[in-house]
Structures are given as structure tokens and as C-alpha cells.
């Protein structure tokens, strides 16, 4: 049976997650393929410690490549900064005939991965909270 | 009842609930029977139940609960419950929790339900909820398992040994004996248009464990849907061979267009029989409505 503290924490967390808004990284480049898949190229900042002579032996790529399948690419399109996570889940569920909970699990997990790779930034939610919610 | 309702049957208990309250937790065989429902934001209903051979004194339990409760918590008796439900209403700053209990004498089942009202308490909905919680009918040779979009009527000898619910992938494994089997696994897979790139009859062999050898593959209708069937076998370990048996496996799959789900059933047994068959008392109910969520503004 839910305790007082447990319940209030759960409520805050779920509300925060659903009302958070994911934004796409404006600096990234998206290359779309004919089959609906996409390749996202996210610019990376060179770490301070990666200076000569370390940089002579440790390779550094200026961009991170993230490959998305057609479902992932469609979800990324929904992250346009106008929809909150709840609206994205609803759209995703309607498009793929899923229940809210099924869609919620997929969308939050996917957004967590994208935010860890710097593809999107979720405003109103830290990465740890996104991870805690999907668990 | 304006909103659509859904029936969930889990380990001998039936719960009728609003369709947008989904199963958030369902206890497995080694745990105390429990099922929890939540809506988009909150946990809404927690049901604990037990099959016992004595009649519990619910009034005594409530007295003990009152005595042990935090003095700052406001507790009121539940007076407007339906049937023989007895309980307490616990008011908290961030909502109300209604704790109710009932003993179903015929089935010998004691049920404890906690209904969470984050906003205002809806007494009508609460009455309907409590009215819709009862043990499943026990006189049938089969038991209904219905939750998370899957509905299986199964021989009573088979118990649910394992279950998992990953993204768009519900898996239930039944067996009368968890060590020896036979094992019957039901999988319900969502979004087939994205991963099912070949006909089912070609996809199904890829789902068979590597140690099995495919003996037969054919198209077969199941639940009025075109599907596929694969029979495979494995010579088994030394003990199996000593008993002059083999491990046989039957895989059946079909696509339910109404639900947009692929159903995959696998049945594995040790037998001398060359053609494994699904248990006689076994039925999967597909073509059920999928409750796609309404946009928040329309709720």
C-alpha cells in the first residue's frame, strides 16, 4: 500500500516527466534515407585534457554519429519543441496502436538514449530523472 | 460508466477497472498475489489477495490498523462501500486512500484493495471498482489469464511460471511443473510492420533455439488468421535419451490485424510422440480492442 512519502514523490516525478519538453540539438545535422531511417551527426566538444601530446595518440572525432531506424526518426521529428512528452507518447501510441503505458516505456527510454547522446535536450527534466522514470 | 472498462484476470482474481488504468505490477508465482494499476500519472489501485482456509476478522484487522497508524493521519470508517467491503478512508494532504477488505467465502479468498484518489474522491467509480473485484469462477476446467492486452484461457493444471512485459513484447510462460514441463510460452509482439520483413512462415524458424532441428514447416490458420506452424525436435540430454524420449517443440504464429500484433506460441515437451499438439484446454482470445489513449484534453 503506498506510503505518504512514496506517493508524493511518485506524483511529482510522473508529472514532471510527462510535462517536460524535448528539443532537438540545433547544431546537429540529420541525413534522411529513402527507407525512412536517418543518420544524425552531433558536433562534439573537444575535451580540455585532449591536448598534445595526448591528442597525438588518442583519436578524436569532431562529430558523433547516431543511426536511427524509421521509428526512431519519426519520433525525433516529433521532438520539435512544441510538444511535451505526454503529447509525443499519445501521438506515438496512436500511430502504432499501442496502449499509453507501452508507448510511454518506449518513448521515455528512447528519449533518455537520445539525450545521453546529445541529440535532444529535455527541458524540465534531468537525465537522471528520465532514467528513474523509465525504471 | 462513461469511460470504457477493461477486465483483468490474474492468478484467480478478476478486477474490472477503467481501460486507461493499466497494469503497473503483477506478482509472479513466488510472491504474495498482488496486482497494481496506474493511470498516466499516479498509482490508482493496489490489490493484494490470498486464498486461505479460515475466515479472517476484518474488524480486528481494521482496529489494529487504526492503532498502528500515525496519530497525525486522519482515518474515517468506510461507510458507503458496496457489498461486504469493510475499510477505512485515509486522508492525506496530497490525496485520499481508501483501504477496503473483503472475504469471499465460497472461493476462500481474502482481498485487500487500496484505491488512491489524488484529487477528489469519486464514490461512484469507487463502488464500481470494488464491485468489480472478485475471485474468478472456479468450476471451469480452465483458468482465464487476462492482463496487459493478452487473454489466455488455460488448463488449470498449468500455472504461470514466468512473465515479462518489455516494450511492446508480452511473454507468459506456463507449465504444470516448473522443472519438467511441458512448457507453453505465449508471446504477443507489437509493431510488426517495423520488424516483420518476411512472411510468418519464414520468420518463425528464426525463433527456434539453435539446438532444435526443424522437422516440418507449413502454413496453418489459427484463431481465424492465416499463420504458420513449425515442428522441431532435439534429441535431449542423457536422461531424456535413457527414457527413449525426445524433446519436441511446436511453434505457431499468426498476425492479428485487428490488434496489429503477432502472436507466437511455443509448446515444448519430452515425448515419444512425433507430433506435438497444443493442450486441449487452451485458448487465446485475440481480435480484442486495443485502448489507444485519447489526447489529454479529451480525457
Image (cartoon, coloured by chain):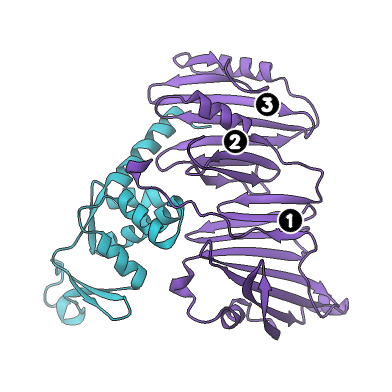
Chain colours: A cyan, B purple
Mark pair 1, 3: CA separation: 27 Å
Quadrant in which residue A48 is drawn = bottom left
Total residue callouts: 3
Position above or below: A100 against B93:
below
Residue that mark 2 sits on: B47
Residue A2, how many percent across, how many down? Answer: 49, 32
Q: For the point 27% across and 64% down, which residue is it?
A: A76
Q: Which mark is residue B125?
A: none
Dot 3 lies on which element? strand
Q: Say which chain tag 1 marks.
A: B
What percent of the width, then of the height, locates residue B196? 49, 76
Whether residue B216 sits left or right of residue B191 in the image: it is right
Above/below status of B29 relative to B201: above
Q: Which residue is mark 3?
A: B102
- Label 3 environment density (alpha carbons within 10 Å; few <14, some 14–19, many ≥20): many
- Chain letter of mark 3 equals B
Per the model, the C-alpha gap separating discs 2 and 3 is: 11 Å
Q: Residue at x 56, y 19 (%)?
A: B88
Which sits earlier in the primary sequence, circle 1 or circle 3? Answer: 3
The picture quadrant where one finds residue B13 is: top right
Tell which circle, 1 or 2, labels the residue nearer the N-terminal end. Answer: 2
Residue B207 appears left or right of B116: right
Q: Are marks 1 and 3 in contact (CB under 8 Å)?
A: no
B268 left or right, relative to B73: right
**Residue B178 shows in the view:** no
Residue at 38% over, 36% down = A11
Q: Are marks 2 and 3 in contact (CB under 8 Å)?
A: no
- Reading the image, the residue beneath label 1 is B154
Q: Badge 2: how crowded within 10 Å, few (<14), some, or many (20+)? A: many
Amino acid at each position: 500500500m503506498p506510503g505518504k512519502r512514496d506517493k508524493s514523490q511518485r506524483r511529482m516525478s510522473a508529472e514532471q516527466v510527462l510535462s517536460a519538453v524535448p528539443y532537438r540539438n540545433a547544431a546537429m545535422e540529420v541525413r534522411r534515407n529513402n527507407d525512412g531511417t536517418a543518420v544524425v551527426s552531433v558536433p562534439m566538444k573537444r575535451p580540455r585534457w585532449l591536448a598534445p601530446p595526448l591528442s597525438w595518440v588518442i583519436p578524436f572525432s569532431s562529430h558523433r554519429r547516431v543511426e536511427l531506424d524509421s521509428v526512431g526518426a519519426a519520433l525525433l521529428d516529433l521532438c520539435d519543441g512544441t510538444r511535451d512528452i505526454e503529447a509525443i507518447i499519445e501521438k506515438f501510441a496512436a500511430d502504432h496502436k499501442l496502449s499509453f503505458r507501452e508507448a510511454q516505456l518506449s518513448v521515455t527510454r528512447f528519449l533518455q538514449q537520445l539525450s545521453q547522446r546529445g541529440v535532444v535536450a529535455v527541458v524540465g527534466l534531468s537525465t537522471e530523472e528520465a532514467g528513474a522514470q523509465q525504471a | 460508466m462513461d469511460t470504457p472498462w477493461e477486465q483483468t484476470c490474474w492468478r484467480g482474481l478478476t478486477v474490472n477497472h477503467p481501460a486507461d488504468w493499466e497494469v503497473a505490477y503483477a506478482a509472479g508465482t513466488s510472491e504474495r498475489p498482488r496486482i497494481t494499476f496506474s493511470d498516466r500519472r499516479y498509482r490508482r489501485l493496489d490489490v493484494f489477495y490470498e486464498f486461505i482456509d479460515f475466515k479472517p476478522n476484518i474488524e480486528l484487522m481494521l482496529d489494529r490498523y487504526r492503532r498502528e497508524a500515525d496519530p497525525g493521519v486522519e482515518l474515517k470508517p468506510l461507510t458507503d462501500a458496496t457489498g461486504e467491503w469493510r475499510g477505512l478512508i485515509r486522508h492525506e494532504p496530497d490525496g485520499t486512500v481508501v483501504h477496503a477488505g473483503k472475504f469471499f467465502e465460497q472461493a476462500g479468498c481474502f482481498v485487500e484493495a487500496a484505491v488512491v484518489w489524488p484529487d477528489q474522491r469519486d464514490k461512484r467509480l469507487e463502488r464500481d471498482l470494488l464491485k468489480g473485484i472478485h475471485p474468478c469462477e472456479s468450476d471451469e476446467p480452465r483458468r482465464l489469464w487476462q492482463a496487459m492486452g493478452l487473454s489466455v484461457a488455460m488448463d488449470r493444471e498449468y500455472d504461470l511460471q514466468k512473465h515479462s512485459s518489455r516494450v511492446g513484447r508480452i511473454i507468459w510462460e506456463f507449465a504444470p511443473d516448473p522443472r519438467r514441463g511441458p512448457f507453453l510460452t505465449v508471446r504477443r509482439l507489437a509493431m510488426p510492420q517495423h520488424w516483420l520483413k518476411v512472411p510468418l512462415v519464414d520468420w518463425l524458424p528464426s525463433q527456434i533455439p539453435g539446438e532444435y532441428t526443424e522437422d516440418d514447416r507449413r502454413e496453418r490458420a489459427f484463431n481465424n488468421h492465416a499463420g504458420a506452424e513449425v515442428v522441431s525436435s532435439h534429441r535431449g540430454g542423457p536422461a531424456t535419451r535413457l527414457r527413449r524420449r525426445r524433446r519436441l517443440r511446436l511453434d505457431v504464429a499468426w498476425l492479428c490485424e485487428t490488434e496489429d500484433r503477432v502472436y507466437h506460441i511455443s509448446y515444448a515437451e519430452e515425448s515419444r510422440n512425433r507430433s506435438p499438439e497444443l493442450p486441449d484446454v487452451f485458448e487465446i482470445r485475440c481480435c480484442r480492442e486495443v485502448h489507444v489513449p485519447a489526447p489529454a484534453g479529451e480525457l
